[in-house]
Image (tube, rainbow, N blue to C red):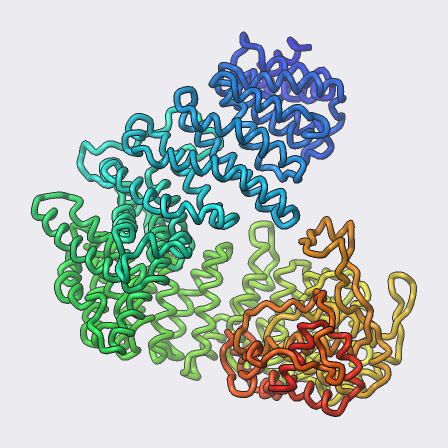
């Protein structure tokens, strides 16, 4: 069998396609024989066979035939007795003299372990631990398996032997540099860190076990780390470049300690924070030689020579700097940090060392220069402080920002000193002919710009307190920046000077700001400057739009637009994003720049970009924002001109049949058309209704594309809200008006077979039809409500259920409260368990159960108003409806995180309570989170009953005499504070803002509702108080006593 399998393996490497395919088919047939897998394992270990043939197919066989739990499993399954023979053979491969064979064996064994350990392979861990005491080859192979092994989710029982047996063995490897390579030793730290991650995942369920493990592990490992970090890094790295990986892994482990087990690290921070800076200071000469120097004979950073296991194959000093900066960013904000970083009110040598390290290690490297000159997009990514691109500058500036948050003035003083130092040093280096003279100056200017928001705030505080400026920006603008704007031989410094000026533009006089802006425009118009400088000029203009008054921009905005728009067809990706955002920023600041005529050219160019990049979500999102801004401009001729230009094109795109390559385009087109409507009021242009809206209604009749359906529903909802009258007036070829056409679509959206995820906006559409077309909807209202109830019965998705509830909540909050209750009480609907309930019971139960999933400020107001109306309504039918109450807390879920699997095996139990009581609880929950409430963000758990009971309550007073109102001081803001909440899109919508519902002070309304009901004991509210938990009682008490 072995020879037959080997022959097939050899044939699969044949250059002849026919031979190769025949061999592959034969191999598949051999896989069907149990002995075939055993032969592959034996071939793996046969030294006489070529390596390329030894390592083929064993992993494929295990994935396909080892267990049905594998995603790629195919019958037949490997017999148990054959598995028992294969495992030890593969295990022996971990010690093979050939590295590639060890890697193949390790990967195969990791796959086996994922399925078999511990039940079918109980001695694996002990065997691996034993292997760690063997030869360097054995340790290498074992560590590859272990690294993969600890990445699996392990139970507490499985984790215990890892902590007790495995970690001491790998720690011994870490402490034995004579026998083991730096990469293998670094891998041991990675294993330790992954074990910490697993301990973190189970610490809430097993706090005592995790605490015991951490108390045993932490001292020995941190002691080892201290010893390793205390040695001279530059000497180690010069001997073996891979020694960097050990320090990188240590600082990454420190960061995990910060996040998962901070108390175990805090006592060691006075040692580790200075050590981190010492390490960087020691390595700085190597960093300058290998990464910064532009000398012709400057060497490249060494590449690792040995296998680095599961770690990154490329090891750089910048990786260590990033790891250290990431460690320091939270460390400098801890309670022990002041004693480490400050001498009195001033920063000490450690704080100065941190600032120096960031300035030095965020200089532009040779690799940066080469990449950025060749790839403008890479330059934009690395230099854009608004992206989430991770890099050395992002990491370093986050660190300085973290210190600025805590100790702004000491850090600012150090920054001032370092700027002066780098300006002088750079001048000297330039005079002496150093080609890299500009790099430290560019770095410090970039850092100052990176924390410009903090520095501007400090300078404003200085001005308000009539203090001398803590940071002398003016000196830079007077003596440094002007000379750098013409430094064409150092384009990155030249570009930095432009960007720096824009970051502090708010501090410049109008005339000086105009001069700097004019210089940026000149650069943009020049054919002689390099691409990085042009990109910096574009970013400069964008920043100026943020920081200067419209009067500064207006004289040059038309020229800026004329220079930016022609660039659009020639650029892509990040450079395109920056340019598009700058175009938008220019006309958003100078709102008089665009009129009904000029919008045609602007919109045409932007639309062409959209057509070219419909598959780029960033581009399409920016284009939508641009169109939203255009239609919102004050010139009334802009929106109609834009609609006349764009709407017919979008209608054609929506209506064009699609293939696999264009299937995404109709959804994008509908989404873009919505940007023509979303941000403005009505009436809408007839061209929009006759083109795009008609196309949307037609495609919604038959498409199954979820994007088209969802954005199409949003489109119809927007049209109903902004200009329902035109929908009523419009008629199709059969004479149906727009409302009638939408009603036919609703029958499709509400069908039991229609996708729930596709219908998550159907409720909002129906609710706004009630708002805007009530008289037209009246004849079909009873049938429509019944259809919604029928769909509620089978609905599963919470977001779909809440959207179906919204129309009822809206009706309950209007003058039709009672008539809606009458209608819902007049019919019953059969449930899946073949029992029946009234429509009222179904709606109220769904509403109460899913009220917490309702999103959008407007929708929440609709729900709150409907709840409050029903709460004070004296209607016995409401009291008879029983809904889900609070979760029952018992031993199964007390102090336990209920994961999905645990909830499935032990479903949560809930009390059953009358609807008015539930409404009471929901109003108390919502009343403290309404806009204008101080202390928003305080977490109050309304789902878990307190265990304290009611013993502190006074028998004569249902609400007791308890706590001070001060504990609920945020309640006082209900009566006088209308702000404090960040608005969502519904808050800014003109149509919704003008609705009577928006004029209601909802916090005051809910407060008045509760006070009135309690004073008059409406619907027996006094008897409901005993059903409240302590948090709810406290909220009610403060509402009543405010």
Residue in the picture at 76% in, 53% down: 892
Q: Residue at x 78, y 52 (%)?
A: 906
Q: Is residue 555 left or right of residue 587?
A: left
Looking at the rendered image, the quarter that the C terminus falls into is bottom right
* Vertical position of residue 262 compared to residue 625: above or below: above
Asked if residue 923 is positioned above or below residue 696 in the image, the reply reads below
Task: Report the front residue among 899 and 369.
Answer: 899
Of residue 380 and residue 569, the one placed in the foreground of this image is 380
Q: Residue 596 location, x and y as percent?
A: 40, 79
Q: Percent position (x, y) of residue 768? A: 66, 79
Residue 639 lies, in percent from the top left, at 46, 78
Which quarter shows the N terminus? top right
Q: What residue is rendered at 65% in x and 58% in y?
A: 705
- Residue 632 lies, with reference to residue 237, above or below; the image says below
- Residue 571 visible in rendering: no
Task: Find residue 1003 and report its image quarter.
Answer: bottom right
Question: Residue 362 or 712: which is nearer the viewer?
Answer: 362
Depth order, front residue of 1020/49: 1020
Q: Is residue 8 left or right of residue 472?
A: right
> Whole-percent x and y of residue 510?
22, 77
Instruction: Specify whether 395 is left or right of 198.
Output: left
Residue lying furthest bottom: 1016
Where on the picture, by quarter, is residue 16? top right
Residue 890 visible to an observer of this rendering:
yes
């Amino acid at each position: 069998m072995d020879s037959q399998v080997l022959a097939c393996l050899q044939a699969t490497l044949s250059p002849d396609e026919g031979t190769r395919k025949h061999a592959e088919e034969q191999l598949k047939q051999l896989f069907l024989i149990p002995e075939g897998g055993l032969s592959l394992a034996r071939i793996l270990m046969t030294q006489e066979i070529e390596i390329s043939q030894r390592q083929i197919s064993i992993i494929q066989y295990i994935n396909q035939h080892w267990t049905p739990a594998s995603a790629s499993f195919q019958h037949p399954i490997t017999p148990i007795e054959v598995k028992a023979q294969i495992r030890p053979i593969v295990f022996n491969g971990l010690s093979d003299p050939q590295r590639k064979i060890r890697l193949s064996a390790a990967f195969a064994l990791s796959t086996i372990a994922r399925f078999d350990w511990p039940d079918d392979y109980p001695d694996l861990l002990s065997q691996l631990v034993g292997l760690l005491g063997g030869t360097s080859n054995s340790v290498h192979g074992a560590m590859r398996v272990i690294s993969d092994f600890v990445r699996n989710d392990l139970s507490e029982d499985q984790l215990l032997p890892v902590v007790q047996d495995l970690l001491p063995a790998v720690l011994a490897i870490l402490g034995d540099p004579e026998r083991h390579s730096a990469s293998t030793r670094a891998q041991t730290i990675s294993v330790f860190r992954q074990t910490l991650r697993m301990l973190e995942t189970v610490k809430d369920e097993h706090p005592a076990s995790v605490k015991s493990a951490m108390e045993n592990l932490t001292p020995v490992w941190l002691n080892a780390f201290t010893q390793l970090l205390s040695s001279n890094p530059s000497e180690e790295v010069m001997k073996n470049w891979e020694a960097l990986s050990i320090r990188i892994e240590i600082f990454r482990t420190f960061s995990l300690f910060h996040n998962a087990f901070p108390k175990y690290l805090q006592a060691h921070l006075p040692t580790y924070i200075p050590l981190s800076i010492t390490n960087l200071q020691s390595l700085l000469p190597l960093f300058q030689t290998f990464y910064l120097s532009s000398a012709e004979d400057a060497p490249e950073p060494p590449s690792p020579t040995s296998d680095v296991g599961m770690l990154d194959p490329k090891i750089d000093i910048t990786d260590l700097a990033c790891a250290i900066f990431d460690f320091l960013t939270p460390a400098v904000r801890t309670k022990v940090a002041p004693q480490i970083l400050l001498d009195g009110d001033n920063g000490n040598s450690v704080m100065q060392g941190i600032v120096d390290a960031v300035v030095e290690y965020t200089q532009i490297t040779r690799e940066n220069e080469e990449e950025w000159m060749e790839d403008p997009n890479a330059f934009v990514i690395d230099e854009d402080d608004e992206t989430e691109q991770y890099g050395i500058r992002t990491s370093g500036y986050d660190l300085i920002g973290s210190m600025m948050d805590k100790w702004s003035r000491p850090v600012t003083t150090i920054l001032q000193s370092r700027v002066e130092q780098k300006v002088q040093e750079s001048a000297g280096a330039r005079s002496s002919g150093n080609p890299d003279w500009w790099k430290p100056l560019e770095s410090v200017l970039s850092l100052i710009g990176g924390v410009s928001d903090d520095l501007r705030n400090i300078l404003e505080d200085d001005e308000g307190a009539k203090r001398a400026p803590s940071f002398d920006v003016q000196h830079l603008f007077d003596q440094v920046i002007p000379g750098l704007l013409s430094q064409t031989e150092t384009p990155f410094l030249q570009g930095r000077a432009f960007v720096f000026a824009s970051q502090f533009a708010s501090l410049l006089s109008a005339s000086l700001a105009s001069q700097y802006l004019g210089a940026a425009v000149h650069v943009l118009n020049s054919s002689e400057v390099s691409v990085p400088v042009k990109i910096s000029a574009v970013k400069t203009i964008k920043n100026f739009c943020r920081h200067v008054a419209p009067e500064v921009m207006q004289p040059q905005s038309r020229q800026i637009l004329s220079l930016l728009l022609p660039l659009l067809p020639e650029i892509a990706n990040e450079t395109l994003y920056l340019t598009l955002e700058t175009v938008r920023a220019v006309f958003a600041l100078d709102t008089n720049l665009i009129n009904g005529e000029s919008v045609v050219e602007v919109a045409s160019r932007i639309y062409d970009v959209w057509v070219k990049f419909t598959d780029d979500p960033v581009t399409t999102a920016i284009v939508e924002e641009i169109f939203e801004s255009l239609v919102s401009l004050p010139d009334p001729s802009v929106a109609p001109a834009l609609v006349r230009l764009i709407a017919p094109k979008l209608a054609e795109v929506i209506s064009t049949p699609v293939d696999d390559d264009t299937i995404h385009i109709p959804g994008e087109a509908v989404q873009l058309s919505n940007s023509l409507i979303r941000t403005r009021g009505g009436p809408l242009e007839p061209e929009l209704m006759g083109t795009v809206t008609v196309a949307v209604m037609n495609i919604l009749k038959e498409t199954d594309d979820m994007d088209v359906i969802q954005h199409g529903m949003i489109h119809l909802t927007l049209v109903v809200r902004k200009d329902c009258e035109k929908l009523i007036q419009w008629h199709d070829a059969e004479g149906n008006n727009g409302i009638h056409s939408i009603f036919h679509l609703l029958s499709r959206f509400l069908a039991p077979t229609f996708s729930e995820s596709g219908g998550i906006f159907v409720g909002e559409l129906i609710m706004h039809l009630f708002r805007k077309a009530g008289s037209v909807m009246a004849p079909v209202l009873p049938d429509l409500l019944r259809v919604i109830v029928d769909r509620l019965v089978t609905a599963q998705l919470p977001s779909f259920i809440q959207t179906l509830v919204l129309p009822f909540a809206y009706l309950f909050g209007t003058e039709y409260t009672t008539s809606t209750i009458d209608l819902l009480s007049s019919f019953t609907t059969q449930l899946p368990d073949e029992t029946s309930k009234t429509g009222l019971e179904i709606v109220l139960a769904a509403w109460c159960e899913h009220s917490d999933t309702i999103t959008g400020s407007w929708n929440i107001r609709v729900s709150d108003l409907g709840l409050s109306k029903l709460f004070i309504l004296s209607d016995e039918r409401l009291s008879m409806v029983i809904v889900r109450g609070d979760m029952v807390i018992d031993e199964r879920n007390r102090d336990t995180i209920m994961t999905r699997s645990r909830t499935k095996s032990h479903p949560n139990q809930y009390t059953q309570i009358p609807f008015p009581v539930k409404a009471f609880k929901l109003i108390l929950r919502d009343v403290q989170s309404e806009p204008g409430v101080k202390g928003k963000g305080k977490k109050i758990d309304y789902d878990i009953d307190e265990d304290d009971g009611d013993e502190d309550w006074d028998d004569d007073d249902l609400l007791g005499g308890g706590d001070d109102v001060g504990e609920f001081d945020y309640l006082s803001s209900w009566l006088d504070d209308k702000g404090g909440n960040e608005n969502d899109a519904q808050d800014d919508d003109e149509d919704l803002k003008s609705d009577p519902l928006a004029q209601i002070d909802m916090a005051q309304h809910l407060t008045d509702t509760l006070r009135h009901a309690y004073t008059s004991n409406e619907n027996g509210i006094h008897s409901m108080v005993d059903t409240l938990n302590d948090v709810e009682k406290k909220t009610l008490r403060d509402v009543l006593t405010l």
